[in-house]
Image (cartoon, rainbow, N blue to C red):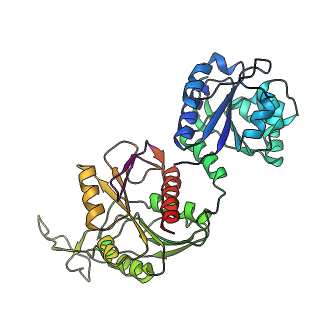
């Protein structure tokens, strides 16, 4: 992913300051340029050297220190930033900013910037719920600041309640979502499949899989935000339909096959994230199958291979597949890429912690038609969706 955006990260003094290290690392991996400002208290928890090495930039800690280049440092950073994140932000800094106090380099830079400002509070539950803190946060929200609600859980002080800094992946997703205001997919018609299929055994039972549809729905939502006309063909899923997305609901592999082929000639990109059953019962019983013996034999027949058929039919379309495997990940994914005439395949080992079905994160490898492979760390599915769409956008640009 290469956002190419400039992010200033303010780090305040609190035990959650250690999570800011991961935030900086994730934003750098997303292709952002990062500069860090630390309050004096923050340096008691994490050293500036850590942030300097991760960001590849000097860390600012003092209003009066010798500047690394000839400029008024807080003004230069304020003008440089495309977004300004403060994580963790303490009740003290929230109070200062809400009341116009600028008495250190962080608060002064916040006052001077015109970039969108994102605040991620982290503090003791009682401090967070204190009416003064809540009033200050409400005031800042009214002024256009973006506030990420703290998570609830056991805090370092031993109290359980709201006040935990959200996980770095959540914060980074919020920042990326704010930055992704580009409409680089306007004029593109994108078909996305999501969820699993259900192959009926009888009126009550079916053969299915564990897919929730989260990956496909995340891609659909991100593509629509970037201006694409999105058709989402979804197997059964309880997820809400993303805004500005046209959904077509199906249940079986055969129904998904028909729905995809009906749209294929009119689209520019197909992203097939659905987990489609390879086989279906040869006969579906008209009545519920009753228990009648120690064993039950069901004959299965092969379902149509949607990706293979699209690969045979494709003309100008980009065709992207997914490969969820439990062993020999790269071999199976490469075979699928070649056999089905794909431009790109997203491969993941569903046995890994943090990857697979029914969770909000994934660990994927992107394999391209030219043989290049890109490995991504554990990321949220929303973050992976943005990375994939960046790659697709680059491929569309090259093809025009």
Residue at 42% x, 83% y: name it. 262
Count how many numbered circles sit on residues in the image.
0
Using the image as rendered, state which of residue 183 and residue 383 is in the foreground: 183
Is residue 93 visible in this depiction of the protein?
A: yes
Residue 177, percent from left and from top: 62, 52
Using the image as rendered, state which of residue 280 and residue 126 is in the foreground: 280
Residue at 37% x, 76% y: name it. 314
Is residue 180 in the magenta section? no
Q: Is residue 253 left or right of residue 381?
A: left
Residue 247, percent from left and from top: 52, 74
Residue 343, percent from left and from top: 38, 63
Q: Which residue lies furthest to the left in this view?
A: 294
Residue at 19% x, 78% y: name it. 282
Q: Is residue 53 left or right of residue 371?
A: right
**Magenta segment, which residues?**
362-378
Residue 81, percent from left and from top: 72, 40
Q: Quadrant of residue 188?
A: bottom right
């Amino acid at each position: 992913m290469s956002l190419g955006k400039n992010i200033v990260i303010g780090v305040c003094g609190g035990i959650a300051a250690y999570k800011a290290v991961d935030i900086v690392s994730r934003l750098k991996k997303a292709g952002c340029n990062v500069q860090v400002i630390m309050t004096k208290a923050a340096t008691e928890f994490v050293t500036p050297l850590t942030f300097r090495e991760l960001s590849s930039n000097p860390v600012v800690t003092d209003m009066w220190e010798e500047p690394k280049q000839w400029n008024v440092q807080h003004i230069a950073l304020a003008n440089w930033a495309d977004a300004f994140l403060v994580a963790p932000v303490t009740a003290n800094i929230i109070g200062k900013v809400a009341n116009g106090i600028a008495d250190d380099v962080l608060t002064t830079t916040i006052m001077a910037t015109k970039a969108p400002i994102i605040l991620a509070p982290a503090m003791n539950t009682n401090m967070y719920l204190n009416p003064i803190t809540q009033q200050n946060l409400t005031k800042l929200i009214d002024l256009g600041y973006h506030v990420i609600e703290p998570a609830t859980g056991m805090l370092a002080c031993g109290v359980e309640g709201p006040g935990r800094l959200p996980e770095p992946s959540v914060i980074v997703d919020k920042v990326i979502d704010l930055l992704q205001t580009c409409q680089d997919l306007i004029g593109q018609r994108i078909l996305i499949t999501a969820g699993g299929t259900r192959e009926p055994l009888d009126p009550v039972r079916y053969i299915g899989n564990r897919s929730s549809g989260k990956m496909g729905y995340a891609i659909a939502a991100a593509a629509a935000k970037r201006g694409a006309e999105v058709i989402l063909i979804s197997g059964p899923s309880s997820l809400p339909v993303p805004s500005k997305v046209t959904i077509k609901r199906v249940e079986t592999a055969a129904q998904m096959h028909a729905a995809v082929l009906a749209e294929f000639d009119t689209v520019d990109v197909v992203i097939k994230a659905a987990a489609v059953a390879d086989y279906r019962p040869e006969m579906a019983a008209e009545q519920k199958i009753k228990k009648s013996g120690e064993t039950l034999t069901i004959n299965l027949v092969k379902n149509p291979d949607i990706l293979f058929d699209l690969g045979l039919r494709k003309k100008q379309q980009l065709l992207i597949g997914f490969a969820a495997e439990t062993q020999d990940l790269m071999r199976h994914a490469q075979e699928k890429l070649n056999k089905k005439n794909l431009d790109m395949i997203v491969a993941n080992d569903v046995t890994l912690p943090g990857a697979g079905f029914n969770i909000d994160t994934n660990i994927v490898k992107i394999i391209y038609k030219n043989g290049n492979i890109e490995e991504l760390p554990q990321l949220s599915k929303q973050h992976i969706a943005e990375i994939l769409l960046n790659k697709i956008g680059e491929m569309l640009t090259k093809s025009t």
